[in-house]
Amino acid sequence: MRLRMHPRQARGTKTRKTLAAVFAAATLLLGLAGCSSGSDGNGNANGQAAEGNAGGAASGENAGPLKFSYVRPTWGPATYTKGGAYEKELFKRANVDIDVRIIPVVDYDATIKTTAASGDMPDAIWGWGPVDPFWKDLQDQGAFVKLNDYLDKYPAVKAAVPDGIWDKMADDKGDIYFIPNLIYPVVPFFINYRADIFAKLGISEPTSVPELEAALQKIKDSGLGIVPMTHGNTIPFWAGKDVATSFGAVSGWAPSKEDPNKLVPPEMQEETLDYKFWLQDLKKRGLFDEEAGVNPDASFGETKFKAGQAAVILGGNLAGLLTELRKNVPDAQIKTMPPLTGQGGQKGGTRVVFPQDRGFYINAKAAGKAEGIFRFLNWTLTEGSDFRRYGIEGKTYNVDPEGRKVPIPDEQRENDYKGAQIEPLKFLDPMSEKLDWQATELQFVGVGIGDQFPYYKEMFEKYAATPYNDYKDPTVQSPTAAKIGAQIWEDYMAKVDGSILTDMNLTKDAYKKARQKWLDAGEQTIIDEVNELQTDKSEPNYVD
């Protein structure tokens, strides 16, 4: 498959509940254990060293290193320490001196918006870009450097991003201020399960939602004392985004059942409520992890699964799960359920995402450094591309007898070369690297389960065969939403929507009553404005 923008470009994923989770989606797809940047959230393979020294890549041949400050989220453990060997090697090759600050992704949005609003921003700052009203407002106020001339001067940077995405980043004057971080739009969150436990209990692989429920009940009743089903490193509803498709839920805006020419948010869709309250029902019955929606540590479910304490997990990558699980249960086997058929015959698949998740701006106060930053970015995509992708031989990868650069598993690396030391120094990777099957196969080889790669790819293609899209154009901004959208959500919906998995007495009727108050407070106006501004309401198409 290759990226192909819809004639109107793509419509995205940024609903209130999924903003913080989209990048985690990419991590679960390709952020495998053997990747030199660990779970870098970019879906990239990393590894081979570049020949020679980049010299004056950033500052000019005879100049000293370009110094700039940089803040970004981190999806792996927040253990980065400055001055490590990988950092020194990058700085030497690229002739830069980057003052990096990282913020865990779960805290990033709230923390960085406070920083940005104070005006005390670093030279380069990660944000959501013009698809988010907060960042668009700062952009319109002149907080960031205009990039058009630099994009023309540094073609490798411009070529890394599809033209359709650049078009989405441009304002009504055609000016671009934001460098988007790309993700591949198809990121399945597989339903992985302990095949050895299923075999022990005589459970056939589920192919439908009712069969999954029956399997979970049998596991609960087995006396094994393990959690029937848990979820991966994100919020539970997003971890189950591909189970949601079996209910017909797109986890985003979709045509109204009453009026197909009118788009409505997920809170207005019966399919979405059916899915969310189904998870609640599973939890009531002891079939879904009691910590779901409660434990603030997003990694609790994967920790349980890897320890052999859960039988099914929504999300999580096969390579990382299997290698860690076998440290605790040497004979464990993991398989992936196919996309499930819903109770009404609905065919499951995968929720496709808008192929941009965050990115970064250059602070207007650092305009004098913009040229150097672009020179550095261009170097990372040209002479420094091998170093960016692969790292250093013997430290982040080894060459196998076939001449392939095989990533060294993170746990086998020296501390200075682990993912937590590399991820904070990541900037821009081209779309051409976002679904690299050869690189993904080498990640499986690197962790010693190369024989599992054909199965992984087969299951990926099964999920990808039935895509579900968010119909809303992420660049369409409702004026009312910009003014009061966040506030009325907090006033009327945050509590009920966030309580589905914590308040077992919450009903659909109570949810709908809160929803009506939300609509009356201004959400209906927001919905109407979105429909007026977005004239093309057809389903987007990101891939062939």
Image (spheres, rainbow, N blue to C red):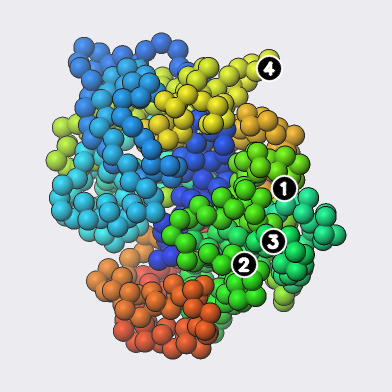
| C-alpha distance separating marks 1 and 2 | 19 Å
Q: Amino acid at mark 1?
A: Ile
Say which label, 1 or 4, has the lower sequence index. Answer: 1
Which numbered circle lies on residue 402? 4
Instruction: Using residue 218 as the reference point, say whether residue 502 is left or right of it.
Output: left
Q: Residues within 10 Å of mark 3 (few under 14, many from 20)?
A: few
- Residue 92 occupies quadrant: top left
Say which label, 3 or 2, has the lower sequence index. Answer: 3
Give the percent coordinates (x, y) of residue 146: 23, 43
Up-down relation of residue 366 to residue 253 (above or below): above
Instruction: Using residue 326 as the reference point, say whether residue 137 is left or right of it.
Output: left
Label 4: element kind: loop
Say which label, 4 or 2, has the lower sequence index. Answer: 2
Which numbered circle lies on residue 225? 3
Residue in the picture at 72% in, 75% down:
343
Q: Residues within 10 Å of mark 2 (few under 14, many from 20)?
A: many
Q: Which one is closest to the eye, mark 1 or mark 4?
A: 1
Residue 488 seen by the camera: yes
Q: Amino acid at mark 3?
A: Gly
Give the percent coordinates (x, y) of residue 21: 46, 56
Residue that badge 1 annotates: 334
Q: Residues within 10 Å of mark 1 (few under 14, many from 20)?
A: many
Residue that badge 2 annotates: 288
Say which label, 4 or 3, has the lower sequence index. Answer: 3
Give the percent coordinates (x, y) of residue 316: 59, 50
Say which label, 3 or 1, has the lower sequence index. Answer: 3
Q: Quick one: which residue is furthest to the right in this view?
A: 202
Label 1: element kind: strand
| C-alpha distance separating marks 4 and 3 | 45 Å
Residue in the picture at 75% in, 64% down:
223
Residue in the picture at 57% in, 51% down:
302
Q: Amino acid at mark 2?
A: Phe
